[in-house]
Amino acid sequence: GVYVVYGLTVTGTQFIGNRAEGPAGHGGGLYASDVSARTVEATDFISNTAGGKGGGLYINSGPLTLTHTRFISNTSYLWGGGARLEGGATVVGSEFTSNHTISSTGGSGGGLWIGGIATVTGTAFTSNTSSTDGGGLSTNSALTLTNSAFYSNTAAGRGGGAYFLSTATLGDAAFTDNTAAGSGGGAYFSGAATLQDAAFADNTAADSGGGLFARASFVMTDTQLIRNRAANGGGIYVS
């Protein structure tokens, strides 16, 4: 694919079938290192593969602005089947579909892995698979997510739709038909969470929290939980 060291602006570009090989091979389609300006817009990452992190895209520092971009059928061995974004991100109007991770020890974020403070708006996560946590999305810092949907994602661990390690604020978010082999079929909240106008329907967890699992302070307003299933807490499990 492409390796960038300085400023990064990508618009209307396609990355298809590229490979970053070996366990240190990050960013199957695009790797950006220590760049000051980071913008990716109206771009497709399709069927790229990384032996390490970020099947389609890997940003190793600083925030990225990602708009109207599609990640389809990308694969990484480690974190971020579609993309791994370190240093935070603003993601708007994008799609993560049928991306995968492979490692049973470091494969969170089947669709997208974000490190650093992030905002995700108007984005769809569909049919992504994580070999550990966060089938569609995995975050490790504060996240604000609005007007976004998680459909038919799968995690071998926790958070079939999404795994939130830190604080999370969700508005107008839908989690439908996601599955976790552990807890949190729709979503797993490890940090404090605030939900408003959210919907959890037909999600499944083999362990606890079919709709969602919450480990810290939890505030929910005008939210629906419908036909979710789990061994404990079919709709919600609060620990």
Image: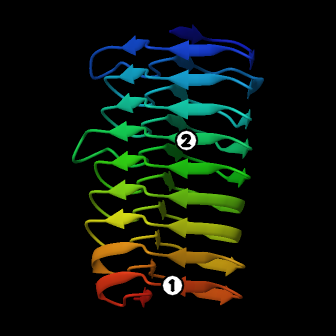
- Numbered disc 1: secondary structure: strand
Relative vertical location of residue 216 with respect to residue 163 in this rendering, above or below: below
Q: Nearer the viewer, residue 152 or 63?
A: 152
Q: 152 left or right of 14?
A: left
Spatial CA span between label 2 and label 1: 24 Å
Residue named by callout 2: 96
Query: Identity of the amino acid at label 2?
Result: Phe
Query: Identity of the amino acid at label 1?
Result: Ile
Q: Quadrant of residue 143?
A: bottom right
Residue at image coords 69%, 12%: 6
Q: 218 left or right of 229?
A: right
Where residue 155 appears, x then y in whole percent? 33, 57
Where residue 121 appears, x then y in whole percent? 74, 53
Residue named by callout 1: 226
Where residue 55 appears, x then y in whole percent? 43, 28
Q: Residue 8's mark?
A: none
Q: Nearer the viewer, residue 142 or 155?
A: 155
Residue at image coords 68%, 32%: 69
Q: Quadrant of residue 14?
A: top right
Relative vertical location of residue 170 with respect to residue 26 in this rendering, above or below: below
Evaluate whether residue 137 shows in this view: yes
Crowding near the residue tagged with mark 2, few <14, some 14–19, many ≥20 C-alpha atoms within 10 Å: many
Q: Quadrant of the C terminus?
A: bottom left
